[in-house]
Image (cartoon, rainbow, N blue to C red):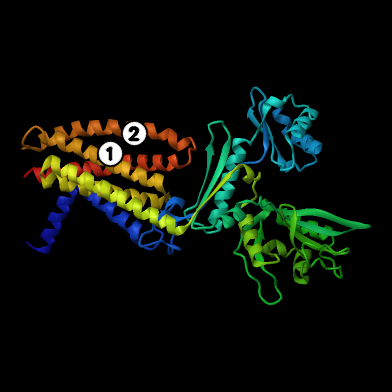
Amino acid sequence: MSPVGQLRDAYGWAKLNWRITLLVVFVSVSLLVLFFPFELVGGAGPVEEAEGITNLQWGIDLGGGASVRAPIAGYIAEDVPLDPEETAALESDIAAELNVSTAEIHVHVDDPQNQRGSVETTAPAVEREAFLEAMQAAGVDVSDGDIRSGVHEETRNTVVRVLNDRVDVAGLSGSRVVTATQPGGEHFVIVEVPGQPLSEVQALIQERGVVEVVAHFPDGDGYRNETVLDFDDFDRVDPANPGEGNRPPNVPVRITEEAAPGYVNDLNEYGFTEEGIENCRWEDADDRPDDPGYCLLTKVDGNVTYAAGITSGLAEDIRTNNFLDSRIFLMQTGTFEEAQQLEINLNAGGLPAELAFERGTNFELEAWLGAEFRVRSLVVGLFAALAVAGMVYWRYRDARIAAPMLLTASAEVVILLAFAISVNMSLGLAEVAGLIAVLGTGVDDLVIIADEIMQRGEIRTNRIFDSRFRKAFWVIGVAAATTILAMTPLVGMSLGDLMGFAIVTIAGVIIGVTITRPAYGNILRVLMLD
């Protein structure tokens, strides 16, 4: 037969047995995702710091790293009466009573129809009694029993988002930031960073990271401070520079088109662009001179990290409004480490509340111990696979049934590992347990298919085969639906490692029902029918 004829026959066979073809395609793509040293999902470019020969990311318990588990500091009064139209005024009144910023008082309208909501404070120095007295003084009908430690769900979600952005900007792949709930109702934030020491993880997340640019300038007999830029005013943040020559470490930034006119007007109004002004003499961020001149202060969490004036060229651009076209300038710092942290804070934003580390727990695992756990997990997985293979062969004594069953189960694991890489999931002990559970339930389903097809004697026609396969697949489908329904609450209940186990199990069941189980049935059809 000519090559064209052979190709036509192969295409016809692949089209007729499209379930087997689909399995081969998924396995081939999965092997590429597992071993090809480029990010095939979510971007392009080489994978940085890949461990071993695969692109798998290991969690702390299999790869080493640090975990920080802490509640969010703050107090909240829930289900209190309030006017939805007066939330801003209420925040201002409570902040004035506590002598804190309005950014540390949050009013959430949970039930607009019945005018009920929550009031929280994230100011670290505020005590429970002072918070109660401030709310009562502001006219809130609240008692001591209405206040508990913690913050609103919206604030927790913001903390998780900001911390996720921080670890992403820092390039810490495989990290995980989630919330977990104690049986008593207290909420914790869990930050897990593989391959990093505990001290670096704490340094990354312990600062609130609220960045602002403050104009410090002479005003009459003294000096005046005015905030000219905050986090929302930045449009683009470039990577930090270590600085060259006389230029200190810095972060190139561009402010938004909406913020630029106000920034220009403020600097013109405050005198920063006038010729012959006393430029900034505040050389040490920790030591303000008596007469510093005109300075732009970079503040993080209210602390000055660097003070500098503006160059004559930038002053000319601002004075002539040429700055409105580029909107780019350098935010300078004292050290390159401060510039890197400033870059992270500008990209991720500030935390709305601090983490109460003193009420949490820390965990660190050395990399060598994580590697040992990986070896042991691999041994357990191989033992489970061999045990399953032995039982399958002992039951059927027919390689036409047992060999495709084991190959199909192995293909399911390969596809599931590729799924873990594609969703940036770190594999820990819980996820490995999920893989083993998927392997066991998958082989169980394949046994159901084989028993239903083979138990009634020889199969002579496609119609008989299809009838028996449909009966088996109905049982498998019901079992899969039951498993998914049982595991779904674990995904949404924020129970830490159980979430990873549930996600792997659900994904494995879906992959099995849609890809591997139908392919196994198709393989049996090819082997059992002439």
Mark nearer the N terminus (2 vs 1)? 1
Image location (x, y in percent) of residue 124:
71, 43
Q: CA distance from mark 2 to mark 1?
A: 10 Å
Q: Is residue 258 visible?
A: no
CB under 8 Å between discs 2 and 1: yes
> Is residue 495 shown left or right of residue 285?
left
Residue 483: mark in rendering: 2
Residue 441: mark in rendering: 1
Question: Toward the viewer: 71 or 174?
Answer: 71
Residue 237 against residue 510 in the figure, above or below: below
Residue 316 against residue 405 in the figure, above or below: below
The quarter of the displayed image where residue 243 is located: bottom right
Count of labels in the image? 2
Secondary element type, mark 2: helix
Please state which amino acid type lies under the numbered disc 2: Thr
**Residue at 63% of width from left, 59% of height from top?**
341
Image location (x, y in percent) of residue 380:
31, 49
Q: Residue furthest top?
A: 114
